[in-house]
Each structure stands twice: as structure tokens, then as C-alpha cells.
Image (tube, rainbow, N blue to C red):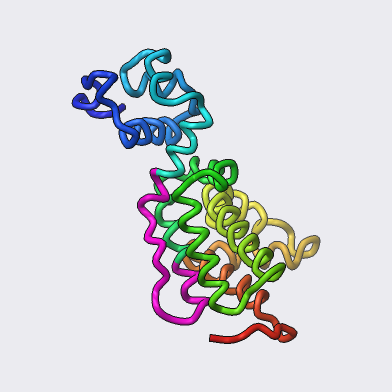
Amino acid sequence: MLTQFLRGRMEHDLTTDQLAVAALAVVDRRDLSMRTVAAELGMSPMGLYRYVTDRDELERLVVDHIFDTVDVRPPAGPWETQVVALAERVRAAFAAHPAAVALTLTHRHRSPGVLRWAESLLGVLTDAGFADRERVVAVRAVFSYLVGAMQLEHLGPLSGAGTRALAELHPDDFPHTSANARRALSLPADEEFTEGLHALLRGLTGPESTRARR
């Protein structure tokens, strides 16, 4: 629950940030709804409707709140370094809130925070020479990898029971799968994420590319 200070505030004193914090606290623990967020704030569900129209708006507030902590300024260096940095910052912001990752898919078109991050990513890709269809595919691929990797890290980490079960498969029946799983058990999550992203970026700059290099 929120602090006694917030719980005791009058309904008309609530700010957008306080609503977002309450909604995020609910997402971290259980299903989000107007009723559960109202309970988190110590107010009635009808009172909450004074500030937001529905659950959809609460979800967008959660996404905005997390993305507002993300630095969208690309660092100096090659474009690949810039893309990796932008992706790693989002991953770090969601590390404590894995249940909120899926909300980015629903609200990526309307969340100002997501839009600012995507604009920065598109700027990096544009400066690197990506254009037209190539840029569409590139930004979609990076975003898909980012969201998918964050969800996998939470729902099916390499250090988890699923990987251990694969590692215990009989090598006569599944030689590649069991060997790969045994190796995967020792791969740190940070390295898995970064190396996977680098592999994706290498694919975007294959030998057939005529893209301008920075």
C-alpha cells in the first residue's frame, strides 16, 4: 500500500503522478482495475473516475511513469552503441516492474514516454542511413526484441527450472538441446540481453547492405 501520507490526502489533491504510482504498485502485485487502484489510494472507485476514464488510461499512466525515468538521449559513439544504450535503459527501468512490460505493446502509440524513446531510436537509425522500408523493419525489430527479451527474462529466465529441465534431457535423444541448455545455465542475464541485441543489429547491417556507415 501507499504511505499513510498519500492515503490520507483528499481526493481532489491527487496528482497524475500519484495516480500512476498507485496504479504501478497494483500492477506489481496483482491485476490492475479501477477497483484495485481505488483501494490502493484509499478512495472509492467512483471517486477515481473523477481522474481517469477507465483501466486503459491507468495502464497508459503506468507506462508513462516508467518511461519518464528513461534517458532518451543517445550517447556518443557508433549507431550500434547508441541503440544498445537506449534499449538497456528501458530494460533497467522495467527491471523492478516486469508485469508492466506487456503494457508497452498496448500503449506504444499513445504514451508520450514511449513516443519520445521511439523518436530517439528513429533518429539514431536515420542518421545511420536507414530509410523507408529498411528503417520500418529495423525499429520494429529492435522494439520486438526489447519487449520479448524483457518478458522472457521474467517468465522464462535461463537460470530457471525450464532450462534445468532441458539440461537434464537424455543426450542420446536431444544432444543439441541438452548441451545448449547446460551452457545456458551459466549465461548471465545481462550478457544474454546485450549479446542477443548485438546479434540482431549485425543482421540489420549484413554484407548485402548498401547503407551509409557512420
User: Which residue is depicted at the point 65% across and 83% down?
Assistant: 211
Asked whether residue 193 appears in the rendered view, the answer is yes
* Left or right for 210, reference 60: right
Whether 90 is among the magenta residues is no
Quadrant position of residue 77: bottom left
Q: Is residue 19 above or below residue 169?
A: above
Quadrant position of residue 141: bottom right
Foreground pick, 26 / 136: 136
Q: At which x and y percent is residue 212?
A: 61, 85
Quarter of the N terminus within the rendering: top left
Outermost residue toward the left?
5
Q: At which x and y percent is residue 164?
A: 60, 54
User: Which residue is depicted at the point 49% across and 45% down?
Assistant: 111
Foreground pick, 201 / 213: 213
Q: Is residue 40 above or below residue 99?
A: above
Asked whether residue 186 appears in the rendered view, the answer is no
Q: At which x and y percent is residue 13?
A: 25, 24
Q: At which x and y percent is residue 143?
A: 58, 58
Q: Is residue 140 above or below residue 98?
A: below
* Left or right for 161, reference 40: right
Residue bounds of the magenta highlight: 65-85
* Left or right for 189, reference 51: right
Outermost residue toward the front?
132
